[in-house]
Image: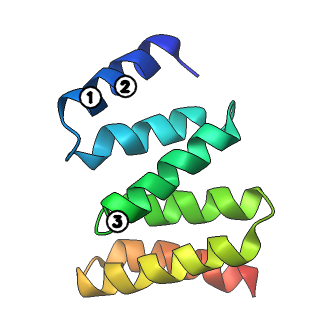
């Protein structure tokens, strides 16, 4: 985790609460060092920015790695549907690949 980047991202979050990217980037920063903060940020993204597609892949993997497999799979499946609706074929392939490997 890069403390300077964390502080910068927190500042960006305060400046523009409607921008999902700093929240997403901060969740990624916390993944390895503070699972509770990462979880809270992923949940915030899923609630407040449901169409921000990058969240679904990373959040799904995160929850699976935290032994919350059912929740992770559910998040991945929602992301798959959003990716299909957005005609984002590369994300469809990525998410489908993870789901296929879990079966």
Q: Any mark on residue 10, and which?
A: 2
Q: Please name the residue shown 23% across and 41% down the image.
A: 17
Residue 9, position in %: x, y? 35, 26
In the structure shown, which secondary structural element does the residue marked by tag 2 occupy?
helix
Residue 51, position in %: x, y? 28, 69
C-alpha gap between disc 1 and disc 3: 22 Å
C-alpha gap between disc 3 and disc 2: 21 Å
Residue 69, position in %: x, y? 74, 72
In the structure shown, which secondary structural element does the residue marked by tag 1 occupy?
helix
Residue at the farthest right position: 67
Tell me which corner region of the image, top left, top right, bottom left or bottom right, holds residue 98. bottom right
User: Which of marks 3 and 1 precedes in the sequence?
Assistant: 1
Look at the numbered discs 1 and 3 and tell me whether their residues touch, using CB distance below 8 Å. Answer: no
Residue 54, position in %: x, y? 39, 59
C-alpha gap between disc 2 and disc 1: 6 Å
Q: Nearer the viewer, residue 71 or 102?
A: 71
For residue 14, above or below residue 21:
above
Q: Any mark on residue 14, and which?
A: 1
Q: Nearer the viewer, residue 91 or 22?
A: 22
Say few, some or many: other residues with alpha carbon within 10 Å of mark 3 (under 14 / 14 to 19 / 20 or more): some
Q: Please name the residue shown 37% across and 25% down the image.
A: 10
Tell me which corner region of the image, top left, top right, bottom left or bottom right, holds residue 46. bottom left
Provide the residue designation for mark 3: 53
Look at the numbered discs 3 and 2 and tell me whether their residues touch, using CB distance below 8 Å. Answer: no
11 sits left or right of 41 in the view: left
**Quadrant of the drawing holding the N terminus:** top right
Tell me which corner region of the image, top left, top right, bottom left or bottom right, holds residue 81. bottom left
Q: Please name the residue shown 30% across and 44% down the image.
A: 21
Look at the numbered discs 2 and 1 and tell me whether their residues touch, using CB distance below 8 Å. Answer: yes
Comparing labels 3 and 2, the label whose residue is closer to the camera: 2
């Amino acid at each position: 985790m890069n403390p300077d980047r964390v502080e910068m991202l927190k500042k960006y979050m305060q400046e523009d609460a409607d921008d999902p990217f700093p929240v997403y980037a901060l969740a990624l920063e916390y993944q390895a060092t503070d699972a509770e903060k990462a979880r809270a940020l992923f949940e915030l993204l899923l609630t407040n920015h449901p169409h921000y597609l990058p969240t679904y892949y990373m959040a799904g993997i995160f929850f699976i790695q935290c032994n919350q497999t059912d929740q992770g799979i559910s998040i991945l499946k929602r992301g798959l549907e959003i990716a299909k609706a957005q005609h984002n074929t590369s994300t469809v392939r990525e998410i489908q690949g993870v789901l296929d490997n879990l079966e």
